[in-house]
Amino acid sequence: MRLWLLFAVLTRATAGTYFVTVAGLGGEPEYEQRFASLAKEIDGLLKQSAGALRIDTLSGPSATKARITETLQSVSRAASRQDSLVLMLIGHGTFDGVEYKFNLPGPDLSASELAGLLDAFPGPQLVVNMTSASGGSLAALKKPGRAVIMATKSGTERNATVFARYWAEALRDPSTDTDKNEIITALEAYRYAVAKTVAFYERAKRLATEHAQLEDTGSGEAVREPSPENGQGALAARFGLLRIGKAQLAANTPEKRKLLERKEQLEQQIAQLKYQKAAMASEQYRKQLSGLLVELAQVQAEIDK
Amino acid sequence: MTRLNFTQTMLRALQSGTVVTLLACAQPGSPPAAGPARAMASPPSAAALAVAECQKHRHYGRRQEARACYTQLSSRRDPYLMAEGLWGLGFYQDANSAFRQAVALHPKSAELRTRWGRLFLERYNGAEAEKLFREALELQPDYAPALVGLALAASEHFDAKAREFAEQALKLDPNNIEAQEVLARLALEDINFDKARQEAEKALQMNRDSLNAMAVLGVLEILEDKPQTWLRRMDQVNPVYAPGYHFVGHQLQLNRRYSEAIEYLKEALKRDPDYWAAHSELGITYMRLGLEEQARRHLELAHNNGWRDAATTNSLRLIDSYKNFVTVPGERCEVRLDKKEAALLKLYVVPELEKAIATYEKKYKVKLAEKVKLELYPNHEDFAVRTLGLPGLGALGVTFGTVVAMDSPSGRPPGSFHWASTLWHELSHVFVLTATKHRVPRWFTEGLAVYEETAVAPDWGDRLDPTVLGAVRDKKLLPVSSLDRGFIRPTYPSQVIVSYFQAGRICDYIAQKWGFQKLLDMMHQFAQNVSTPRVIETQLQMKPEAFDQAFLGWLEQQLATPLARFGDWTKRLRQLAQAAREKRHDDVIQQGLEIRDWFPDYVEAGNVYEFLADAFIAKGDRKSALAELERYAKVGGRNPESLKRLAALYEEHSQPKNAMATLEKLNYIYPVADPEMHRKYGELSLEHGSVNVAIREFQAVLASKPVDLAQAHYNLARAYRKANRMEEALDQVLLALEAAPGYRPAQKLLLELNSKQKAN
């Protein structure tokens, strides 16, 4: 699975990502302002990264059901099967036990209406629903090829969430990039935001009223901690949200191609070795890992020259 | 033996634990005595006499006869007699049902409601009991037994009203022996030994076979290190009177003499192995001394035999939860930590405890014979259960001999708790209790512990707060001779806090005027079981009254400015807060600077320092903001965000040493859930300070489960490399690269370490 992931990341260079961010109805001036400013912050970060095909950000009076529909339809028309879509929803949501709705100025947008719009997009999709009650949207949104991140585990967690704040922070904090490949993926950002949300409630000595979840297999079985063991997180790991540092300037000169190939081989061997760790004697594992990492470091040093 | 941060009502918990109904209700109580005027429609006096007969057998230890008597009552058709019989046989649920029927039959009987209330009281339902006593008094306001019931219920939670109720009962019925016994017990708990003796003797005049009065006198003999006569006499009257020994054990616990308490509780069980209340208290006492196996055995026995009061059940639950804890051994200590935070807290708590032990051993010239056992509870209610078996305790830490239990830093909101200060406070108790063999008045050991907090660092300990200042202004401080009562039976809500403050300041005053050695001399004299007035007279060569006068003069001089300005300061602080809300920065600066030094100790929420710092930052004057936050930290301000801001300002102003010192302060306040703070401190230490501190801080980052694991391992690798611990550096860099194989800085370090290894 890990090898496939690496391949997916590498091939992504030929495709592009469409980003749509929507800050819904706040209801109160404080929330209105908070949602809009988070959307604006995300918009700014995406634009800085300069890796997107197109960035649409809707907030305030323009974040209506009609505008969202129009935007998603337009993006779907423009995209190819290799392109990806990242839809981020900030605001309040409601769940009546059957249907989730994203609160917007004018008519709300239901999860099933949203699913219908997303179905028209030809490539892989990521929906980051950061609203209250967002867990209630999974039943409608689940689909193979679509990763869904929700701020709450169910539709019954109805309090305003803080997850969006930490999602935005994840995009601007380089430490989110835990594998240090200079790309912040959806999975990394999810893990960052979850950790920060947990810490927020712990520090405030408040009972947590939101428990973020991720589902990206289409099974509808969302999990809190995606891992190879539970099978969740593979698709989210493919979604590069932001490029940081010099990753995009990777040397593609012909003289370094051999080194790049060797680097890729080594990375694959390291990934394989890590999956065998549990079945190996620790000394043997350490020795092999050390050897591969030293060689990878040497190759990287050559590439960087 | 405790550290408090706010006034509490469950005061008894501070000294000991289980609050049990003793003596009077340890068995189906005294006969349903008639008051001066009998209640209307009450059970016939023949019934009362029948009950009294059974109780008499029990009083004199004639168990078989008592049992036969209660059996007979239980088969009577009169539901009241049936209730008494069932109660006497230990069928509490059935007795309760029978009482319900009896009350339905005689709804206007104050007597029945009172007896029913006593059943509830015995079965640890004080609230329901109190309700019934009050109903009885509504029916018959001069019914003395109902007042006795209220006195007993109030005494369970150390309510000062207990005495009033007992006195009222005696006024209505001068022959009410139970009321007299309650007064003796209350005086004993108030450490007023002369009064306790007098009250107990009065009870014996009423009834020369008063077992409870004998038990009180027996406790006095033990506490005063006199030969025992009264317990022997109690045995002569009733050779199987387990409640009397339970009472003695309980009182010894209250006086922090836990090992002796165990012996008397065992005596209770020798006399009645089925006395489950004593099993429960014995279990809890064992638990206090860290003897969990014995604790569990007795608690389970009590619980499995129907003694399921909150203290027993909660304590068993807590023992079960110990599987979630680990014990970290130190050289002279053992620290029990929750598994979830052990990796982080052991970095700070174990070395601090070792340091404190070494310091006190030198300072008090006392060697501890055993290891100090420290327990830290992230869930405050677990700590409360550990302390008194019940949730709702306001204390931060409690000492039982050489066992200290306290809140973990994560158990309190950030900034509200200085864990190291509490640790040093509690450890001072360990040494004082050891040195005095637990013979020390409460005010002295607490005062010395408070004194020790600021002796470690002036910004530790509690600051003077408006409540305490108000008490000084209103002349509410107690004379030193009776200061213990401020801890044990407060007469106003904040008196416990005020008493801590006063005791601490008395020790400050003595140390300042006579030197610290004088405090040690006093401690050694207290160990000889000498009273406070005598110790003051011998050691300070003055009468306690003269000492009080001199101390108050000194204190008022120390607090002259806050005392004079307190009223104005309160008003002006409100105006300042308003200006800050409206972002009138110039006004905040002008007003804040004017009033800041009127009450410099005030560092709680809405303090002048933070208002000023915010205003200066808004005006772009970061140097002045730094100066204000520096003052705030120096006085003892503990808001983690403000301290972090101060550290950042120091760094910005090229003062890395000060930045590190500030982050070190923060570690003593809230080291949890903040990997970024530890990373920052680690970086600063690596560049400007001690590499060992850097290693500790980067270990703390890892223990805080950071999102960026690779960076955390890499930083620790750098620190190890600087400390020339190459093998550990290599381990860490491999862990960093295992998490993120492409992490370039770690790759470079790996190559460097690898080449060094080859070269060697």
Image: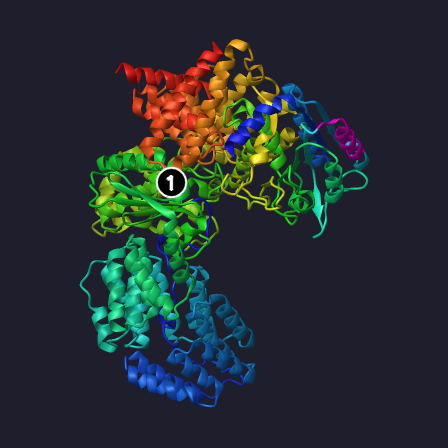
Q: Residue furthest left?
A: B227
* Residue B448 in view here: yes
Magenta residue check for A70: yes
Q: Is residue B546 left or right of residue A121?
A: left
Residue plotted at (30% across, 86% down): B65
Inspect the image, locate mark 1, and give the three-letter code of the amino acid beneath it: Ala
**Secondary structure of residue under mark 1:** helix
Q: Which residue is mark 1?
A: B342
Q: Nearer the viewer, residue A241 or A210?
A: A241
Q: Quadrant of the C terminus of chain B?
A: top left
- Magenta stretch secondary structure, dominant: helix
Quarter of the figure with residue B319: bottom left
B396 versus B105 height, above or below: above
Q: Is residue B256 left or right of residue B574?
A: left
Q: Position of residue A69 (x, y in %)?
A: 79, 35
Q: Position of residue B239 (x, y in %)?
A: 23, 76
Q: Which colour assignment does the render follow?
A: rainbow
Q: How busy is the neighbourhood of tag 1: few (under 14 within 10 Å), some, or many (20 plus)? A: some
* Residue B568 in view here: no
Letter of the chain that mark 1 sits on in the rendering: B
Q: Nearer the viewer, residue B31 or B651?
A: B651
Span highlighted in magenta in the image? A67-80
B562 versus B138 height, above or below: above
Q: Position of residue B376 (x, y in %)?
A: 38, 44
Magenta residue check for B694: no
